[in-house]
Image (spheres, coloured by chain):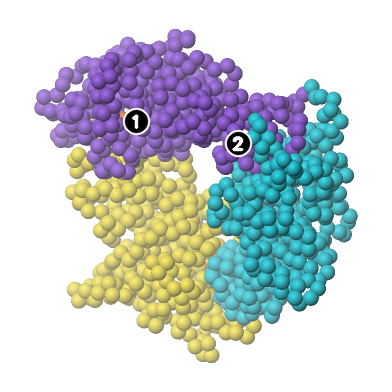
Chain colours: A purple, B yellow, C cyan
Amino acid sequence: MVRQAERQDVIFEQVETDQRERPWEHYLDAELGLRNHWYVAFFSEQLDEGQTRPEMLLGERIYFKRVKGQVYAVEDRCPHRGAAFSSRVECYTPNTVTCPIHGFTFDVRDGNLVAVLTENNSALVGKLAVKAYPVEEKFGCVWVYIGDGEPRPLREDVLPSLWNTENLIIRPTTRYKINSNWRIAIENGFDTGHLYGHRNWASAWRYGAAVPLGTVNKTKEDIRILEKPGDPIGMHVNSSINAWVGEVEGVKVYMNQVDPDNPPPTEGAIYPPDFGPFLPCGLDVPHFPKPGLFHWEWYVPIDEESHMYTILQGAIANTEQEKEDFLRAHEDYLARDIWVDPGTARPMEPPGFNNFDSFGREAMQHVYQNEDFWHRERLYKADYTIIQWRMLVSRNAHVVQKRDNFAKTKNNYPLESP
Amino acid sequence: MVRQAERQDVIFEQVETDQRERPWEHYLDAELGLRNHWYVAFFSEQLDEGQTRPEMLLGERIYFKRVKGQVYAVEDRCPHRGAAFSSRVECYTPNTVTCPIHGFTFDVRDGNLVAVLTENNSALVGKLAVKAYPVEEKFGCVWVYIGDGEPRPLREDVLPSLWNTENLIIRPTTRYKINSNWRIAIENGFDTGHLYGHRNWASAWRYGAAVPLGTVNKTKEDIRILEKPGDPIGMHVNSSINAWVGEVEGVKVYMNQVDPDNPPPTEGAIYPPDFGPFLPCGLDVPHFPKPGLFHWEWYVPIDEESHMYTILQGAIANTEQEKEDFLRAHEDYLARDIWVDPGTARPMEPPGFNNFDSFGREAMQHVYQNEDFWHRERLYKADYTIIQWRMLVSRNAHVVQKRDNFAKTKNNYPLESP
Amino acid sequence: MVRQAERQDVIFEQVETDQRERPWEHYLDAELGLRNHWYVAFFSEQLDEGQTRPEMLLGERIYFKRVKGQVYAVEDRCPHRGAAFSSRVECYTPNTVTCPIHGFTFDVRDGNLVAVLTENNSALVGKLAVKAYPVEEKFGCVWVYIGDGEPRPLREDVLPSLWNTENLIIRPTTRYKINSNWRIAIENGFDTGHLYGHRNWASAWRYGAAVPLGTVNKTKEDIRILEKPGDPIGMHVNSSINAWVGEVEGVKVYMNQVDPDNPPPTEGAIYPPDFGPFLPCGLDVPHFPKPGLFHWEWYVPIDEESHMYTILQGAIANTEQEKEDFLRAHEDYLARDIWVDPGTARPMEPPGFNNFDSFGREAMQHVYQNEDFWHRERLYKADYTIIQWRMLVSRNAHVVQKRDNFAKTKNNYPLESP
Ligand code: FES
Ligand code: FES
Ligand code: FES
Ligand SMILES: [Fe+2]
Ligand SMILES: [Fe+2]
Ligand SMILES: [Fe+2]
């Protein structure tokens, strides 16, 4: 029996109902990520002219190469007998990569087979191709489209504040492989209940950040769903009811920077405006760690059990001086405050903000991967935002990645022509 | 065709028949152990006041904590999103553990949720709980009940000579993870054919132990089955026919301490009286390594492929002097004679009695785990005792542990209330 | 649509047709190798008198022992409870091995149980046996028959030039575990398209070897199938059309020792006469690296994912001086030119001929093992020889090895007698 007071808590009721019915089954299929979307593959500065770089995204092995400034990408799996081009780098010309085993040579710009070094005048030249991936370079990142057919405009898959803010100066901050599924990771990114884990953030003082232990939604309107065709699909998580001081048998628990006897007001906006997750796997965090600064992060699926945690930071800079100031701050402390490589933080006292997030994702991963926690979790009120995200993805993710989706040669002529 | 003489060997006949028919199918299901029993989790001295300790038993992850002297245990898996409490120890008060991810705080004494640090006045407090395990502390060990419902009395799962002997002084001897299934281990414990492996036991001289190469049963009455409701379920392995000297193409093989030209008599009691295996996973070895001394061991399932080999030793001590003598002997040589950590023994010459047992269990494990040896083994006469054990377990183990049995939250209100 | 010119290329047409229809399904079942054949287990010099040696072939664990000069082999898995004899070497007499767990003792010459050290007068002696493998020793190698029933004559499974050449002097060259399926390996051995990978072979100069980038067959008669009952089953790969210079966007690619402006003729014999693969897993390479020298290699399946790459070298030596010359050359450079242990070669510049082969096999292994490349590969004209091999094996390999085939005790009396 539920008390009357609770009956009137619409958020609580909704969480209870939803976790019984789980109206997000499609989301549960998406363990390898969402197909037909653009993904941040790596930072521009990680690939010099003429160089190659292999990466795995959504289980697909992709080989990148920069030619005359432009980045191209092909499947890193030779259609002949499957060797990875990256297993031994063989580039006779800027435009091509050659498979080290039998010398099949492909133009990275379109994937076409341009030479078979081991056969005179091979009949396959001009008729066979390796899958070529659409690539764009923007915001200091290399973006790749994982999917089939004509890619959607890049803009639809870029975090809004990154695309729309004028006069941004942007720096790559970190890129780190974390051992959890991408969904555990993105849910952690805007999880309104996990702030507790950041209570010892060593640099909170620098940004005057008063972060609550956790926050829950007051009304359904706290969440604003952005689902307009042609625009990025995502949601904004807004003002809420905050928990500033917890208590366990009379012992008070509170955040760094919060006076337990004089906490901030219970109701009020905590998240920066327009903060929230977007398809396929990003989190828009404008005005963090303080107003005027920007933080963007992605949890790019590598495979079912890991993601590449990728972070950019930025600022609005209208003058050269402002640019310089930001770059120096980023160099001096911004990146470091946010992130300390796992392993370098002292136990129980994570000095870098995101260390806790990495720990938390890996701590939850085991049971979701091995013990069916997608069906056994016991959600609570703070998970209302997560539930909205799951339903949003279920409605909009038309194709989830499967091992079977992996790139085939786009033209396997003449096998299919009788 | 079998010769007439053999026809009259009832034990031989029975082994041949039984391994054809395998009347122990239920035993073969019990790879994770027997549910609804008490198990030795660890030694009392391994958990100080206020400390916590995670252990896995029968595949369940359990978190122990000592509060005001008493030990409690809860499932080490947060019902919310599955993090292990032990992944980061957070104890704000003696009675509680707090999940490091979202601050769900549970009373270890009953498993009840007492605070959600990240939500003001959470409706779940008082209504959600993590599974709490019945715990008792006795004989210098912490015992935990793995099962459902009201636990049986501890006495039913304690080895008889440990429970019943008066004026015992007891010391923990060793506790070591061994890579074999618990059934391979317990069968090895009373296997009348494996004594051969102990033939080089360096300390046999100290105890005047004349151990045979092997021993087989003469009549079915050699085995006494103990199956009275309300009492420990087990069996006593008694006097037998002994092999003292083996021969391979004229080369004699014999035990340390045995004169091959003048061996002890073939018939006679070898095992100490009342020696034998008991449910769920222990071996009672009173009067070993010599009369007046006691040895108890358990092969506690950790998961399908490993068990915690746990040994206690003891003695009857009626005076302070006798206590001191035993403690000094245990310190000086008793524990060491019995056990040398695997890896420290010289190859082929195991100085510690149980080194061979560990080796033997791991040597047999591979084929049982991977090559269906539960159905391909070729048993012989010395395995008659093992067969009796398997049938005893099949008759009495009403619930075998399955991965599905793993603890759920005992109260997942209000999910189940409409 | 295919151009008219290509229509007339019978090899090209055949490859296209065959890879659509895959008339080699039986070959695809043979991931563990071919049963009922002789295999090179190891080199004679690796097993001294009285010594034992465990090896895995085709997934079977086999225990070898040399007794009075002769090598015997038994299954390295005790029929009793499955321990490996090799887990602890116990040899009381030259003819026997004893299981370290319960003392079952077997004669390695026939596998018969000759003593049970732990039971007086065991009824099983003389009635139980472990599988004994037929063994022969020839050409400095120990050969073992993996199969059932009476073995075929060894001669049928020995590479022809090794069996038939008179006055051979032979030396073991190398034996190295490579992480690829044996079929990837043997296909690589005579793959007419993989020569490209040897273009930097440091020692080509020593043998005056002008090797093309690749070579394809002109007519079906280039391949001579050897399929006469009672003789070794295999094929000879003969003269072909050679590619000497490749070109990528105007950049020329050629082999070490080849003048790109004055290449050798396009048509002509490249492979030494009588070069080719033979069942079960060998490659006959007479007159390599130059006429008068011999090279034989085997890709003996260890399990599904690895093989033992085993190489012998030899020469015809009619006089003592010729023998000495060969032995000195082998010691000084022959073995080294052919093989440098993986890992010691500089990247991209493999000085040992077979380094590239090892690299190539492992580079192709991943997709065949994990991504269904047996059905997704896109073969080309140079693969015509490989296709012939696959069909040859499919026609002649009557029993492929399965995990279920693994040796059972050959006599499990009296279990099967009522
Ligand atoms: S595997 Fe790439 S060319 Fe053959
Ligand atoms: S996972 Fe434990 S409180 Fe959320
Ligand atoms: S396992 Fe070999 S004798 Fe028992
Ligand atoms: Fe966070
Ligand atoms: Fe033992
Ligand atoms: Fe080669």
Q: Which quarter of the figure is the C terminus of chain B placed in?
A: top left
- Residue C192: horizontal and vertical position, in percent? 75, 45
Q: Which residue is mark 1?
A: A173
**Mark 1 belongs to which amino acid?**
Thr
Ligand 4 is located in which of the four quadrants? top left
Read off the chain for label 1: A
- Residue at image position (26%, 28%) is A328
Marks 1 and 2 in Cβ contact (< 8 Å): no
Q: Which quarter of the figure is the N terminus of chain B placed in?
A: bottom right
Read off the chain for label 2: A
- Answer yes or no: are tags 1 and 2 on the same subunit: yes
CA gap between label 1 and label 2 equals 34 Å
Q: Please say if C228 is above or below A87.
A: below
On the question of residue A342 being in view, the answer is yes
Precedes in sequence: disc 1 or disc 2:
2
- Residue at image position (46%, 76%) is B349
- Is B221 on the left-hand or right-hand side of B176? right
**Mark 2 belongs to which amino acid?**
Tyr
SS for dot 1:
strand
- Residue B222: horizontal and vertical position, in percent? 51, 71
Q: Which residue is mark 2?
A: A92
Between disc 1 and disc 2, the foreground one is 2
- Residue A209: horizontal and vertical position, in percent? 20, 25
Q: Quarter of the image holding residue B281?
A: bottom left
- Is C152 on the left-hand or right-hand side of A322? right
Q: Which mark is residue B148?
A: none
- Residue at image position (82%, 49%) is C269
Label 1 CA crowd tier, 10 Å (few <14, some 14–19, many 20+):
many
SS for dot 2:
loop
